[in-house]
Amino acid sequence: MKISRVQATWCRVPIPEERRFTSDFGLVSTFDSVIVRIDTECGLTGWGEAKAGVGSAAACAGLAAIINLDYAPLLLGQDPRDISRLWDVMYNTPREGYAVAGGYALPQLGRRGLSIAAIAGVDIALWDILGKSLGAPVWRLLGGRRAERMPAYASGGWADVTKIGAQLKGYCDKAGFRAVKMRVGVMDGSPARSAARVRAAREALGPEIRLMADAHGTWTVAEARAFCRMVEDCDLFWFEEPCSADDKAGTAEVRRCSTVPVSAGESEFTRHDFRELAELRAVDVMQPDLAIAGGITEGLRIAGIAAAYNLRLAPHLWSGAPAFAAGLHLAATQSAGFILEYSLGHNPMLHELIEESFPVEDGHVAIPDRPGLGITVRESFLREYGQGSCP
């Protein structure tokens, strides 16, 4: 089995005006991602996803170019089942020969950012091919799913203090969610205003629904600490990304000063960033985005760190279908995996890109037993929304 083609396509989908929302990212008017297709000489095709930014709107031309111009020439003619070696080839280029032979990393200078996201997109597609070649779902290759379905939380919550309770309660009524996440942070103007929205949400939801708050890393340590004091009696299930990902020590300080659990990780790259979060005792929950952090291969290493430090794993799944499926398969197989994120924003890359669906029933998502990632990409969708050349 040999790789015959690697093609990355920047896909940009307009969001209807009535479905747009405003957060600290501004008004989000498009959903963008890079969809990776890898073909083999034997006729198998694998699909992956790479993201240029945590938000769904980002210019992805450079990310697609890295895959098409830098990594594709390294992958052509290779056996796609050699996933671990190919990860090292891409990460260590042009010194991959020394790294593979020596058993240690000699990473290229651009070892963070778009180069890792590009590796992630390729890696997810390679796991898809491996599963299809064996007629097995990826979760089987990772050690087997721990349950046939997993609990999910509804991820949204941008409404103001007068409407946030109804918005979140609507999520619960819609699909039986028993956990919901709302946005807080600089978009509210002050910790006090965010705290007021959290209080309104808790009052509407009652004590039985798990409530999370996500600041997108927009507060200073002082602001995040103040917010924690104001919501200590609101029983937050976690407080996500209180401070910038560049300030891991600050995130650790926030965690130490409060009883509110802290989560982070969607802006981190590779196991090395997550090792630092663990060593600093900065988080209770690790949230790698597999389309950013390095794919399923690196996700396994991150999950191992979480388990070793007795932390929990909840992958960031605000993404298209390939990355969502990858995170689902990882979380379903890992000792630390316990809950899935489910986007309640307008997400055509999750719901329209593929022929299948990931329905929520009674607040849970079934772990599919279809081969590979379990998705069939609609190539007509890529042709319609692709920027430049498409598969």
Image: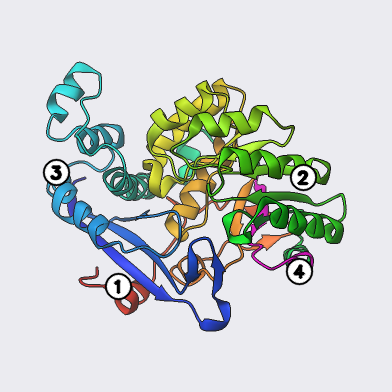
Q: Earlier in the sequence, mark 1 or mark 3?
A: 3
Q: Earlier in the sequence, mark 1 or mark 4?
A: 4
Helix, strand or loop at mark 2: helix
Q: Pointer 1: residues within 10 angstroms few (<14), some, or many (20+)?
A: many
Q: Earlier in the sequence, mark 3 or mark 2?
A: 3
Query: Which is closer to the viewer, label 3 or label 2?
Result: 2
* Location of mark 3 (residue): 74
Residue flagged by tag 2: what amino acid is it? Met
Indicate the position of residue 271 as horizontal and vertical percent values. 41, 30
Q: CA distance from mark 3 to mark 2?
A: 53 Å
Question: 181 or 71, which lies in front?
Answer: 181
Q: Earlier in the sequence, mark 2 or mark 4?
A: 4
Q: CA distance from mark 2 to mark 4?
A: 25 Å
Q: Earlier in the sequence, mark 3 or mark 4?
A: 3
Compared with 327, 337 (above or below) is above
- What label does residue 170 carry, if any? 4
Residue found 70% across the figure and 45% down from its top: 227
* Location of mark 1 (residue): 386
Residue found 47% across the figure and 40% down from its top: 245
Q: CA distance from mark 3 to mark 4?
A: 48 Å
Query: Which is closer to the viewer, label 1 or label 3?
Result: 1
Query: Which is closer to the viewer, label 2 or label 1?
Result: 2
Indicate the position of residue 216 as horizontal and vertical percent values. 54, 51
Residue flagged by tag 3: what amino acid is it? Leu
Question: 231 or 110, which lies in front?
Answer: 231
Indicate the position of residue 105 as horizontal and vertical percent values. 25, 24
Q: CA distance from mark 1 to mark 4?
A: 33 Å
Helix, strand or loop at mark 3: helix
Helix, strand or loop at mark 4: helix
Residue found 46% across the figure and 48% down from its top: 326
